[in-house]
Structures are given as C-alpha cells and as structure tokens.
Image: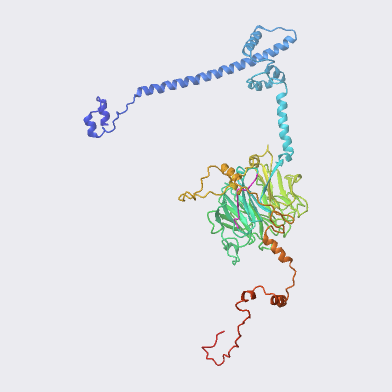
Amino acid sequence: SLLADAEMLGGPDPELAATMGFSGFGKKARTFDLEAMFEQTRRTAVERSRKVLEAREREKEDQVEKEFRSQCTDLSASASSATGAGSTLTPRETACSESEDSSDEDLTGPSVQSQTSAQGPAEDTDDDEDDEFIGPPLPPGFKDSDDDNDNDDTEEEDNNPVKKIPDSHEITLQHGTKTVSALGLDPSGARLITGGYDYDVKFWDFAGMDASLQAFRSLQPCECHQIKSLQYSSTGDVILVVSGNSQAKVLDRDGFPVMECIKGDQYIVDMTNTKGHTAMLNSGCWHPKIKEEFLTCSNDGTVRTWDVNNEKKHKSVFKPRSVQGKRVIPTTCTYSRDGKLIAAGCQDGSIQIWDRNMSVHTKFHCRQAHAPGTDTSCLTFSYDGTVLASRGGDDTLKIWDIRQFKKPLNSVERLPSFFPVTDCCFSPDDKILVTGTSVKKGGGSGKLFFFYRETFQKLYEIEVTDASVVRCLWHPKLNQIMVGTGNGLAKVYYDPVKSQRGAKLCVVKTKRKERQAETLTQDYIITPHALPMFREPRQRSTRKQLEKDRLDPMKSHKPEPPVAGPGRGGRVGTHGGTLSSYIVKNIALDKTDDSNPREAILRHAKEAEENPYWVAPAYAKTQPKTVFAEVEPEDDETDKPEWKKRKI
C-alpha cells in the first residue's frame, strides 16, 4: 500500500523502495483503467442484444412470408380450377401469383403445394413444414413407397428370425485334440478363452491374430484337472477358472494368478462350518453386477459365494436338499440377470432357486424338473430376467417361468447330451434359444439347434463337425456364435454384415512369412577381447551372410539321401548307411550253434597244435619246449595259528 501511495503521489521514491525491500522486483506496479473496462463491457452487451433482436425480427419475417405463400397457394389452386371452368383471375390473385413466381424462380416443375392441396385442407399444416425442400418435387407416391419397402424389410426380418442368425461364415480355432469343455468371451468381445479336457487354457486375441489363427498364450492353471468352466468378470479384468479340483482360481487377463479359493476340511460333517469346498467342483460364474463376487458349486453338496479380495473363507453357503431333506449334489449354478437370485440344478432332477441374501430356504423350487439321477448341465436366465432355460442330462431342453414353476412353458426332447457341461444360451434379442447335441464316434455330425423361444419350434440347425457340440456362446456385442466341440475345435460363426469385429478382424490379415535367414544363419558370438586371429568378422547383414554361406561348399552341402539297393559311392546299402549297421546285420544273420562253448573251442585244438600261429612261433628259438608252471598243492591250514590263516 505504501508503494501504491507513492505511485499516486508521482512515482515511487527510490530510497523508500530500497528501504522497504521493493527494489529487487524491477517492475512498475500495474494500473487498471476501470472506466475503459466498463465501457468495453457496455459495448459488448449492446452488440449482443442487437444481434438477438435482429435474429428475432428475421424469424418473424420468415413466418409472415410462409403464411403469405400458403395463402397465395390456396388462391392459385382455386384460380386454376376456376380457369378450367372458363373464369378469369382477379387483380389481387394475379399479384399474388406474380409475387410467388418472383420468389420461387429457382423451382422448376409443378409446386409441392399444388400437388398436395388436392388431398384436403387438413394436411395443409403438414405441408407448410415441408416447404424447405430444395430442387424439383418427388413424383407422387415415391416417398411413401420407399418407406413401405423399408418397413417391409424390417417386418420380414422380424417375422423370419432365421435371418438374424449369423452363420454365413466360420473360422476354426484348433484348441487341441480333446473336448473343449469351456468357453469365455470378455464383455468387449476382444479376447476368447478356451479350456478343455487336456487341462489347457488358451487365450485368443481377435485383434492380434492373423489368418493362421494361433493362440497367443497357453497354460495349465490347475495342473492335471479338466477345465469345467471359464468366464470373464463383468468388467473383463479377471477370469474365473473352475476345474475338476475343489479350489476355484481367479486369473488376470494375461493368465497370471490373482487368488485361489481355500480348500475345506473334509472331516467336518456340516458343510456350513468349513471354509471352502471339500470335493470336486462342477460349475461357477460371476455376479452380473458386483465385479468382486462369484459363485461355485461342488460335489460336497453346497453352492458357495466368494469374494475375490478374501480367499480365506467363502461369503455364504447354500445347501440344496431333496424331498426327504437329504443332501443332493448341485451340477450347475447361475445368477439371475439382476444378481438377486441364485439357481442350482441338482442330481435328483430338481431346480432350486434362493434369494442371494437368504441362504436357508429356497424361494422357488421345482422337484421334478428333469429325470432323477441325471446331471442337469446348464441353467441360464433370459435377458429380460423372466424366463429360465435348463439343459438336462435326460436329453431335454426346457424353459420355465419361475413364477409358475410347477410346469415348463415348453420343452424339447431327443437332444442327446453325453457331457456334464453341455449348455444352452439365448440370442441377443431374447427370441431364440440355442443348444448343441452330442454324438458317438462315427455316429454322424454334432449339430447346433435354434429354437423359437415362444413356441419352441425348431427354426434352424447347423452341422458343426463329426463330433459332439458341447459349448455354445452367442455374444451380444459381436453378434457371433462360438462353439466348442468334442474333438478339440472352437468354431466361430459370423456374418460380415450383421456381426461386429471379433473374427472379422483376423480373417482379413495375411499370414506372416517366416524369415528363412533367421533359421539358417548361426549365432554370432561376440568376443571383444579376443586376438585378431580368433576374432569373428562382424555380421553386416543377414542376407549377405546367407549369400556367402551359399558359396561355401561345406555349408551348402546337401545331406546324403538314404541308400537303396546294394549301395554305391563307397556306402553300404544295407538297413543303415553305416559300417556298424552292416556288421550288426551280419552278426544277426550268423546262425552258428554255440550252445556248448567247450566243444566250440576244442573244435580248433587239433589245427592249433599242428599249425601254431599266435603263441608258439614267438618262443620257437628261445624256448622250443614249452615249460608250464608247476601247480603246488594247497597246504593244510589247520595247523597254522589263527593270525596266519587266510581270511576268506
């Protein structure tokens, strides 16, 4: 404030500034002209208000002009009808028509109003809104017919749901040689995971694959246990892996473990008091709304919910019971679409549904949903949440309204199922139900059946392969159908027009050519401190090195082909191309009987005595008469003291 006062009095005093410590800034204080700022603001406000008023006046003029045109159109129509009767135009009508002609000089042909005025005065208001068309008017009835065609196409597609099935194209992903028992797609449809009876889980990235269709990662998360179920969470960042052991696993998108459920104590009778499952798992799935919660069911007779952040204990336990109150094994489980209900299909043929927050008593149950003693392999809710579909081990597919759970709405029989994981799914529009059938080896082709949800009429079928169809998945975003088969294939059906992304991304990419130079050239060993005579020349280019190797007769020598016949070029043409194989063959062909080795040796004794060859000629001069060592009789050691006796 002192500096400001000094400025008002005629500038700051240098001594005062130095005393107060302001001299180090080196800048003069900035002043503001408030009157100029207010004036600028006022001018801006006036300019804006003027523009708004001009825009309003322009709208009023346009509206008046439209009304004037409509009046002139009515008059011209009446005038044209009057001239047809032999009458003349009044001066006002003439002026009106002249003004219309002058204003509409650009229009050619009959006016739009003159065509539509004959339809009745009630439609004049609608026609006034269409005065903004530019160019000549459309022929009568053209616009309506075009709209009708569009409506007919959409109505025909609605009436014929078969056209919505994307099956015009397919790709085949080779998972392995054994059954593909699990399929999973992330919510965006970018990655597919497959699991099978060969214990492998493979990751397929549609955007990263080329036409060779190779998986980018393969792992065995549960060692030697068959994979029962794979599913991405609602956010797509983690994967639930349910296998044949008692502990479910959660992996991240790249296959690295996030958590593993704890194993329960199998010696406790009441399964509520154990922290985890004690027997083989059958199925599992994620909560559709809560991204950290998932569900598993097991042969220990329980259905348990878990939290990803707590692997030491389950959240809650649901125990399905038979009519007599005994324990039954749940073979499949699922959440409803809103996540409020938990459903389980059991081995006694029942389907039992609990409220997620009340684990004691069932909310809905059907005791005779499927044949007792069969494995209900799949339960799935429709997208609207009102209908439940069940795929039974009794070769049936049924659809239920859980509010009237005594009798199925519809059912289909004679759909063979040999696998405890055969599933069914709804189409994205909720009108079609899809399931696969199983076949024995050499018993025909496994098929994918499509049924209309309302009537259960068979709409369509696809012959997939000469093995069972186990898993099927219809992704709502991609509009593509994934199928897992019994011979290790994962097929993707799509339509180039109706489907999005997914398989369409990888089929258009060409296969990458393998670089031959990398396989032929040897590794270059870098030895910086070697002597010049031992130092290898640095590789300048792979292509140049390859050309140099081609000139070298040793490196370019073609391997010798196997010899057929008696042999040539110094090589023996027997079973093998080496001398050792020739000798081995001759030894094998030697049929001399050496059953008595003493006789075999003494056979040559007479010839050796008469014509010595090896030992006798060496001693012919020095020792013509053979001298043999005398054999001393063994002394009786009984008289010797103990310490002289030879120890045996």
Residue found 27% across the figure and 31% down from its top? 1
| Left or right of 273 on screen, residue 139 | right
Q: Residue at x 74, y 72 (%)?
A: 593
In the rendering, at what x and y percent does residue 302 appear? 62, 59
Q: Position of residue 214 (x, y in %)?
A: 63, 47
Q: Nearer the viewer, residue 46 or 253?
A: 253
Q: Position of residue 61 (x, y in %)?
A: 56, 16
Task: Give residue 321's position: percent from left, percent from top.
Answer: 66, 60
Figure coloring: rainbow
- Residue extending farthest to the left is 15
> Magenta stretch: residue 354 in it?
no
Answer left or right for 25 relative to 469: left
Q: Nearer the viewer, residue 336 or 449?
A: 449
Q: Which residues are magenta?
A: 212-222
Residue 266 appears in the figure:
yes
Q: Is residue 468 above or below residue 146?
A: below
